[in-house]
Amino acid sequence: MNPQANLIFIINLLLGTTITISSNHWIMAWTGLEINTLAILPLISKSHHPRAIEAATKYFLTQSAASALVLFSSMTNAWHTGQWDITQLTHPTSSLILTSAIAMKLGLVPFHFWFPEVLQGSPLTTGLLLSTIMKLPPIALLYMTSHSLNPTLLTTLAILSTALGGWMGLNQTQIRKVLAFSSISHLGWMAIIIVYNPKLTLLNFYLYAMMTATIFLTLNTIKVLKLSTLMTAWTKIPSLNAMLLLTLLSLAGLPPLTGFLPKWLIIQELTKQDMAPAATLISLLSLLSLFFYLRLAYCTAITLPPHTTNHMKQWRTNKSTNIMIAILTTMSVMLLPISPMILTIV
């Protein structure tokens, strides 16, 4: 793609996100969501591959339906209360429709079917945008309306998302699909706590976005899309592979790493809210996703690939690793000790 066109789409993407997260009026928030959708479509379909075109079409249809539902929900609320302010969403039906619309935008179960397909059809850099920055506006809307959302509905969606995200990712061989199901599983953790402590949802999202960005940028550097190629990629940049292993374990939420922090705080908050059964259930369901993270980590760290692999071992690439990857990797692995400072900031 033409670099100028690419730059225009990226700027529009940031503009749409900024408009949505800084608006008070529903129409402005909707406008931002629409700009976002239109800016990401060319980035998904830029390879002109049939799978990329299919991904762009699926993305457009689901996001259009979700945007229409957001508009419908805000109009219903304005009809009943006379308010167009985002924080004044008080009508129960409007809250229900909005929750469904945001779930569709984010890819929460049962509106998750589009997300793995779209991510699989997109390049890795676009996949990174879809998994991180495109999730920010819907989460910001949930954050602003969190006081009037239905806790039972969100808890149900969250537990189903964590279950399906873990379950469906088990037998995947394509890394982008594994990361899509990982995203669905993490969104479950964010959705369960949004009503009780919205700031924790934002903290979870920031840390998730940081770890996912690390993994996508690393995979883009070593040019890996499948588990079979990941097994032979260790010869390219061994040090980067070792850090990818730690980042994957951090994304799984293992204790000495950064990814443990949001899970620990969410379980603590749920227990305070007398929701110990929900906390136990969501913790047990996250073991499903731990399995496929460990599978990815094993494939990353394996130094003697099986003889059945069809891929030739490649020697190290001359390309030095990006400073951005170095910073993100360090933060993805080592932020747990400074968690008290992070909590004072949040």
Image (cartoon, grey):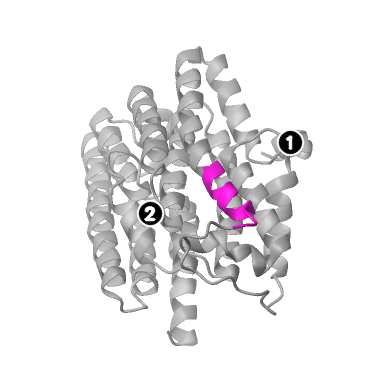
Label the magenta part by its dominant secondary structure: helix
Residue 339 numbered tag: 1
Q: Which residue is mark 2?
A: 29
Instruction: Relative to 175, say whether 112 is above or below.
Output: above
Residue 167 numbered tag: none
Secondary structure under badge 2? helix
Q: Residues within 10 Å of mark 1 (few under 14, many from 20)?
A: some
Query: Residue 238: horizontal and vertical position, in percent?
Result: 70, 63
| Residue depicted at 30% across the width and 76% down the height | 49
In three-dimensional space, the C-alpha distance between marks 2 and 1, rounded to whole angstroms, equals 32 Å
| Residue depicted at 74% across the width and 36% down the height | 339
| Residues drawn in magenta | 293-304
Q: Nearer the viewer, residue 26 or 242?
A: 242
Counting residues from the start of the chain, the first of labels 2 and 1 encountered is 2
Q: Nearer the viewer, residue 241 or 119?
A: 241
Give the residue type at disc 2. Answer: Ala
| Residue depicted at 36% across the width and 78% down the height | 47
